[in-house]
Amino acid sequence: MASTIVNAGPIQGLDYVGLRPAKPLKLNSGRIQIKTRPQCLFTVRASDGDVPIGKTRLSDAECEAAVVAGNVPHAPPAPPKPAAPAGTPVVPLLPINRRPRRNRRSPALRSAFQETSLSPANFVYPLFIHEGQEDTPIGAMPGCYRLGWRHGLVEEVSKARDVGVNSIVLFPKVPDALKNSTGDEAYNDNGLVPRAIRLLKDKYPDLVIYTDVALDPYSSDGHDGIVREDGVILNDETVHQLCKQAVAQARAGADVVSPSDMMDGRVGALRTALDAEGFQHVSIMSYTAKYASSFYGPFREALDSNPRFGDKKTYQMNPANYREALIEAREDESEGADILLVKPGLPYLDIIRLLRDSSPLPIAAYQVSGEYSMIKAGGVIKMIDEEKVMMESLMCLRRAGADVILTYFALQAARSLCGEKR
């Protein structure tokens, strides 16, 4: 909105050309001697045009002198107090000094006092890969694909980097013929994940690559560990395999290895194995509080990694437990974890906050496939606004204390954030 200057007539006793006096003002003993009746020098009015604000060509001293003399320029009047609707009761003011709504009354104030921020740098983008060349849609996860590792993966990473997402985590769909009961394909140096890492690092050296350390994609039993004949998941023997897997991933160029298996003692064992092979610089993001949740269903379809029998409740945490997360966190910290992760995300905000308040380490949250698919489904049938719910859910994870968020919405959310900035 521009302003225009309107001449309000001469001041008594002085001839004006435009807005500048034809004869100079006289000063006497530091006091300005002007005989005049109170009248405005000019009026400032708002207009809808793009005309720049006019200048009076008066010096600062002359402008101040005019104001002192009572010739105050007019400004637009204060806006009238908005009227309440007819029938609004007339009541006395509540006897309260603090009204928190004052700090929420305009977008500018809300932005100024916002306590939590969200940016593409907070996202880690989970990507599914397979041996094929075509990108295969995942029915239970609209918008997600099993990406061909040679082409589709590289293209998707490029799209993410364009909007500021420079961290990804890889999940492989392994051919059934390569699966066995001990998950040996997990540590094949020329396996799908190591090949994909090398390809991406060759193309994008500064890309931050997280990897999943667990046997379930490679196991013919579909469990995160080696299964004994009576159905028991072997802990220490599984950890031995996981160490070889993590070293193979680090050798390929992984930046962060992420044990999601929930075996006891695996963080310390991985740290020892990585250091022994010269990978002291490789970080460990431990799935510290990974719950035996029903929100994982679409993910298991994406990798075709459902357990062949039973469930994962003997190694993943009971959703009813809160304090147990502290036990896991303290163990992971003492064993050398660099990042602590909570999975799932939104249903477990209390656990995220618990770890945030009790640990100085960075906290990660995994917004899992079930959370993603519910928002997508609700958006498709117009029960919710997908975009708004997506952004709110991510902000809630950040507010609860997550430093980074693993989310299938990473690309979509980053594009939304970039659009807001434009």
Image: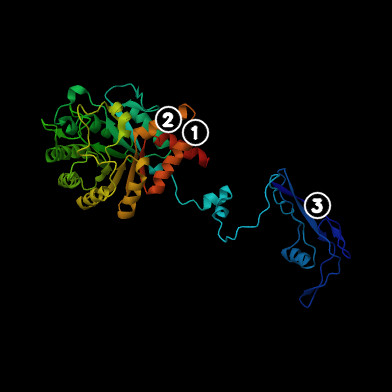
Q: Position of residue 245 (x, y in %)?
A: 18, 37
Relative to 295, 330 lies left or right = left
The image's mark for residue 6 is 3
Relative to 112, 61 lies left or right = right
Q: Position of residue 61 (x, y in %)?
A: 73, 66
Q: Position of residue 183 (x, y in %)?
A: 16, 31
Q: Quadrant of residue 71?
A: bottom right
Residue matched to label 2: 376
- Mark 2 nearby-residue class (10 Å; few <14, some 14–19, many ≥20): many
In the rendered view, tell whether residue 343 sits above or below residue 116.
above
Residue for point 36% across, 23% down: 139
Residue matched to label 1: 385
Circle 3/circle 2 CB separation < 8 Å: no
* Distance from Cα at disc 2 to Cα at disc 1: 10 Å
Residue for point 57% across, 54% down: 102
Q: Amino acid at mark 2?
A: Lys
Sequence-wise, the earlier of marks 3 and 2 is: 3
- Mark 3 nearby-residue class (10 Å; few <14, some 14–19, many ≥20): some
Residue furthest out toward the right: 13
> Disc 3 on helix, strand or loop?
strand
Q: Nearer the viewer, residue 399 or 83?
A: 83
Residue for point 20% across, 50% down: 335
